[in-house]
């Protein structure tokens, strides 16, 4: 275990290249189960989750070579359909292999997924969808595994009751080799899903987004190998934009995907943030005074749930009262007590919602009925140094941003969470002038 030691209060300035999108990399790696041909993927972020997914695929017969953000994948003669518990339980996206395994082998044995504890992940949505395609899937609470069987998967019309990014991708991966046509209604509209679709079509799949929230997949009998370059990570770009604004610096990112960030850039500009963009480059800074904003998270094209933590830190610098209403997950404010340690004036409240079941994207039965879904942030507040603990990936980025803006020396523990999704984050911040070092937990 390592920790970060951060000397905050230094403006970040300079240029940095974005890493590839974590939320595409994991799914394209899983797609190697769908062919015996070689796949090569460029711009793959070297993060813990990617390493874990490659390890998982290795147990299923996929050999990989990962060097310099380039991955080569090819299946060997092993025909295994069981994911070991000690590997699969560490990844939230483990169940993505269910569809490909059922397509290729007719069997799958996959442990209940792990990853960030940010609320009850609606895994039931894509399990139910796979059943509609002809799979027989049961969950055994005694061994912690999903047990799947399928004589063959067939196309059907699947309508998700609520938006599910992972569920949409899971059914796409299952449907490309299924018999007939699969139609996904109320499909996730995230650009990462479209990047996966482009990748799979390069393998010979027949996938079309016919409407903003409808995807049609005509099953094929075989997929072939391909070479592909992943899009950049939108969450990393937002994190760096907020870092520039918080520290009063100017940060230029290359590999920018700013055209997909309008749900962030519009309130960022309204709050006093500045940005200029052209081609694959964007530069972020801030005006002298930040203004408060009210945010409600939503599936794409709305304000992403992954952005609300960093946004909360930004609003501690705004003069007035800001609010953040989390509508996607039922538990995503683990960073709030840590910000309060640093002097932030943040308090919970529950907005009045006329129809909670319709308004919130999570299953209301998973909500305890007591935990508030929103926070008020009063600013401007001068944060101070503290000893902080990360509890999940995006909360980790939030606390790192807070430490960067707070004068003095802060200690940030639990950084294995941020290593799951950010590649060499401290090296990128160091290149921008950030005073941050990684040290072993036992170091003083």
Image: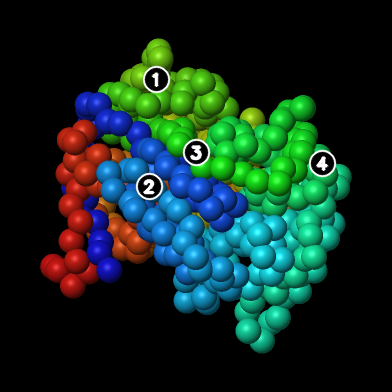
Residue depicted at x 39% and y 20%: 280
Q: Which residue is mark 1?
A: 280
Which disc is residue 226 wearing?
A: 3
Q: Is residue 193 left or right of residue 217?
A: left
The residue that mark 4 highlights is 181
Residue designated by label 2: 71
Q: Residues within 10 Å of mark 1 (few under 14, many from 20)?
A: few
**C-alpha span from label 3 to label 2:** 12 Å
Secondary structure beneath disc 2? Answer: strand
Chain-order first, disc 1 or disc 4 = 4
Q: Position of residue 211 (x, y in %)?
A: 77, 27
Mark 1 touches mark 3? (CB < 8 Å): no
| N-terminal-most mark, 2 or 1 | 2
Closer to viewer: mark 1 or mark 3? 3
Sequence-wise, the earlier of marks 2 and 4 is 2
The residues tagged by marks 4 and 3 sit, at their Cα atoms, a distance apart of 23 Å
Residues under labels 2 and 1: Cα distance?
23 Å
1 or 3: tag closer to the N-terminus: 3
Can residue 393 be seen here? The reply is no
């Amino acid at each position: 275990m390592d920790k970060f030691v951060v000397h905050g209060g230094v403006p970040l300035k300079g240029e940095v290249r974005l890493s590839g999108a974590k939320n595409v990399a994991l799914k394209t790696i899983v797609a190697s189960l769908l062919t015996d041909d070689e796949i090569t993927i460029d711009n793959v972020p070297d993060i813990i989750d990617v390493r874990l997914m490659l390890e998982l695929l290795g147990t299923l017969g996929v050999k990989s070579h990962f060097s310099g953000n380039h991955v080569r994948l090819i299946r060997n003669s092993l025909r295994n359909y069981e994911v070991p518990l000690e590997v699969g339980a560490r990844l939230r996206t483990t169940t993505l292999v269910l569809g490909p395994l059922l397509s290729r082998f007719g069997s799958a044995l996959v442990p209940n997924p792990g990853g960030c504890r940010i609320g009850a992940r609606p895994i039931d949505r894509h399990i139910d969808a796979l059943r509609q395609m002809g799979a027989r899937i049961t969950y055994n609470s005694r061994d912690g595994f999903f047990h799947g069987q399928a004589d063959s998967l067939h196309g059907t019309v699947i309508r998700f009751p609520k938006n599910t990014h992972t569920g949409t991708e899971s059914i796409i991966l299952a449907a490309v080799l299924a018999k007939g046509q699969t139609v996904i209604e109320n499909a996730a509209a995230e650009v990462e899903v479209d990047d996966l679709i482009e990748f799979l079509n390069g393998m010979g799949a027949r996938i079309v987004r016919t409407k903003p929230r409808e995807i049609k997949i005509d099953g094929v009998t075989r997929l072939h190998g391909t070479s592909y370059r992943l899009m950049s990570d939108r969450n990393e770009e937002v994190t760096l934009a907020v870092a520039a604004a918080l520290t009063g610096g100017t940060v230029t990112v290359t590999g920018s995907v700013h055209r997909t960030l309008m749900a962030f850039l519009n309130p960022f500009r309204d709050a006093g943030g500045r940005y200029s963009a052209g081609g694959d480059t964007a530069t972020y800074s801030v005006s002298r005074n930040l203004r408060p904003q009210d945010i409600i998270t939503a599936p794409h094209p709305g304000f992403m749930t992954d952005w609300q933590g960093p946004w909360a830190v930004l609003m501690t610098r705004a003069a007035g009262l800001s609010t953040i209403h989390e509508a996607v997950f039922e538990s995503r404010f683990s960073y709030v007590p840590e910000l309060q340690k640093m002097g932030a004036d943040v308090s919970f409240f529950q907005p009045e919602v006329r129809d909670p079941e319709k308004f919130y994207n999570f299953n209301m039965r998973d909500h305890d009925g007591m935990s508030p879904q929103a926070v008020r942030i009063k600013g401007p507040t001068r944060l101070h140094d503290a000893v902080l603990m990360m509890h999940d990936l995006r909360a980790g980025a939030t606390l790192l941003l807070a430490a960067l803006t707070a004068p003095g020396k802060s200690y940030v523990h639990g950084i294995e969470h941020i290593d799951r999704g950010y590649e060499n984050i401290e090296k990128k911040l160091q290149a921008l002038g950030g005073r941050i070092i990684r040290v072993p937990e036992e170091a003083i």
